[in-house]
Amino acid sequence: MAKSLLIVESPAKAKTIQKYLGKDYDVVASKGHIKDLPKKGGVDHENGFQETYEVLEERGKGEVVKAIRKKAKQVETVLLATDPDREGEAIAYHLMEEVKKANKNVEVHRVLFNEITKKGVAEGLAHPRELDQNLYEAQRTRRVLDRIGGYPLSSLLWRKLAFGLSAGRVQTPALRIIVDRQHLIDAFVPVEYWLVDASLKAADRPGFSANLISVGGAKLEKVSSRPAAKSEDEATKYVDDLKKADFVIDKIAKKKRRQKAPAPYITSKLQQDASTRLSMAPKRAMSVAQSLYEGISFGRGKNAESV
């Protein structure tokens, strides 16, 4: 019989981790959240916005909880290895409540897996910790704000504007940003400009690209941060003159530059790059990311640059 029960969110991850750990561990999946606020109510406005959570029976989580409780009665230790973010911390907290109901003497620890490899799992198990109350409170706050803000505002939009519209703590400010940006686009006055570049190469030297920045000692006016000609005719004249000119390297300057490794993706940046570089729809990008997450490593970050 297994000595420890380890709970993750993803069934695919549970299967992989079970292979790494062997018979001393029973690895199961919660399949995401097991509890949530009821569809109506759930937040007591008169008592400090206290929430009331219930098991998600309509999503089949009643059977999941029942199975986890049964297993919790048979082990000495429960390890909560849900995702390392605020949602994962909330899932872990709700799981702890349920296993304690089944076995009040069982030890409960939180473990984090930053990659689903044998090494990554061993590293996570070597550093158990208590649940992060602050992270759990952050998730509770997020959920309450959704309920007391998004729900009533969405209902108001249905009554006053059109059925099916919605508002929320994220989408409404995001919509404001989009509207403000559109106002800037509408107010934009296009300015014609022409950039003049040349590809140069000596017989025994590597080639390089050069930009026209001045003519006869007079610098071209900058447009969109670069020196440019103001019309096609002007640019054509420069090109014709350059074709007849001799090019001389007047000075060579060398300098060292350090470039830091890019930071991990955040979700929005991942979707942007998938769209612009791969013409991939956001839904498809997230599906691929989820597959990578389940099969390789934790795929979300809080920094804004790509890997």
Image (cartoon, rainbow, N blue to C red):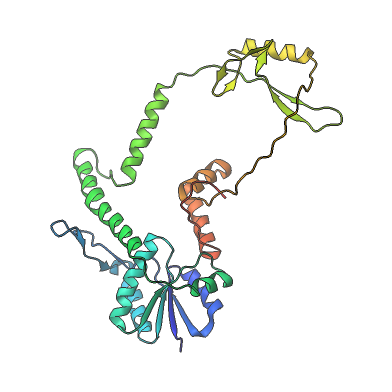
Question: Is 277 situated above or below 300?
Answer: above
| Left or right of residue 74, residue 283 in this image | right
Question: Where, by quadrant of the figure, is residue 194 drawn?
Answer: top right
Q: Position of residue 204 (x, y in %)?
A: 86, 31
Q: Position of residue 63 (x, y in %)?
A: 33, 75
| Left or right of residue 125, residue 94 in this image | left
What number of labels is visible?
Answer: 0
| Left or right of residue 29, residue 243 in this image | right
Question: Is 232 situated above or below 153?
Answer: above
Question: Is 234 situated above or below 87?
Answer: above
Q: Position of residue 137 (x, y in %)?
A: 30, 61
Q: Residue at x 26, y 52 (%)?
A: 145
Q: Position of residue 85 (x, y in %)?
A: 41, 60
Q: Residue furthest left?
A: 46
Question: Is 279 situated above or below 226?
Answer: below
Q: Residue furthest bottom?
A: 1
Q: Residue at x 54, y 44 (%)?
A: 273
Q: Residue at x 54, y 50 (%)?
A: 263
Question: Residue 186: in sight, yes or no?
Answer: yes
Q: Residue furthest right?
A: 204
